[in-house]
Amino acid sequence: MKLQLYFCTLFLFFISAEKLFSQTSTTKDEYTLVWEENFDKPNLNEADWNFELGDGCPNNCGWGNNERQQYTKNNHRIENGNLIITAKKDGDNYTSTRITTRGKHEFLYGIIEAKAKLPTGKGIWPAFWMLGANIKDVGWPTCGEIDILEYVGKEPQTIYTTIHTKDTHGDHASSHKTIFENIEKGYHTYKMEWTPQKIDFYVDNKFVYSYNPEDKTIGNWPFFEPQYIIVNMAVGGNFGGPEVDDSIFPQEYSIDYIKVYQKNKQ
């Protein structure tokens, strides 16, 4: 009887372990690190990064979302190996920073990951995301958008992972939100694994969402073209607002690293 109980317990252990493994990220053994940013230099390298400035006008006022901030080159610093973006209230204006790798580092498939510490407070909207490099030719949302991390201060303990395509975008995007207690405390990892078949999202290596339309079309799967990385912190807007608590400023969004892995060639 004891022997039967032992094997039964062992069997349940392996089933539980298999279930746990299925909910965590796939191993990186089959991948190679192809690009990383560790923020270990005194300043951002503009050979790697572009600054997007202003309020998006005249072509994209409010950055397409009625956001309130003006982006500048002065709302960030590098400190102790971290990029720290600071959102401020300057008189009647809100200021922040938005950077991209457009035209400098663009990727097709792979694991894209960041380790970050979130700001908090109503009206804050930090993000780590990607846009199709062909956006100038085809426009948004046809180019496709992959939101690896979005957090809005009005919804504490909640992480959004979202896909925008021509077929489903804006308020009707393919999105999932996951509750994580204490996500605002300390640093956490935000990652996606992008293959020709699907895009899987992870927070702290826990699987949270998969986008994998069975019948792929230009409308629902523009993700056969390279995309570039964007890091920013918005204020207010259609998603982050509309209310903004001015008492929370300044707020800091800290990024420890960004890494990109791609599959080894067989």
Image (cartoon, rainbow, N blue to C red):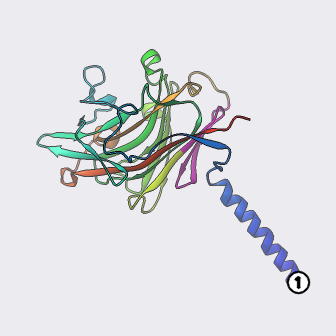
Mark 1 neighbour density, 10 Å: few (under 14) some (14–19) many (20 or more): few
Residue at (67% x, 57% y) in the render: 21
Helix, strand or loop at mark 1: loop
Disc 1 target residue: 1
Picture coordinates of residue 22, whole percent (x, y):
68, 54
Stretch of the chain drawn in magenta: 192-214
Give the vertical position of 21 relative to 73 (above or below): below
Residue at (32% x, 36% y) in the render: 98
Residue closer to the observer: 70 or 166: 70
Queried whether the magenta region covers residue 24, the answer comes back as no
Quadrant into which the C terminus falls: top right
Picture coordinates of residue 255, whole percent (x, y):
39, 49
Instruction: Tally the marks.
Output: 1
Dominant secondary-structure state across the stretch colored magenta: strand
Queried whether the magenta region covers residue 209, the answer comes back as yes
Residue, far bottom: 2
Picture coordinates of residue 142, whole percent (x, y):
49, 22
Residue at (24% x, 30% y) in the render: 55
Picture coordinates of residue 81, whole percent (x, y):
37, 52
Q: Is residue 259 left or right of residue 262?
A: left
Residue, far left: 91
Residue closer to the observer: 172 or 227: 227
Amino acid type at mark 1: Met
Quadrant into which the N terminus falls: bottom right
Give the vertical position of 106 relative to 257 (above or below): above
Residue at (35% x, 35% y) in the render: 99
Residue, far top: 137
Residue closer to the observer: 250 or 166: 250
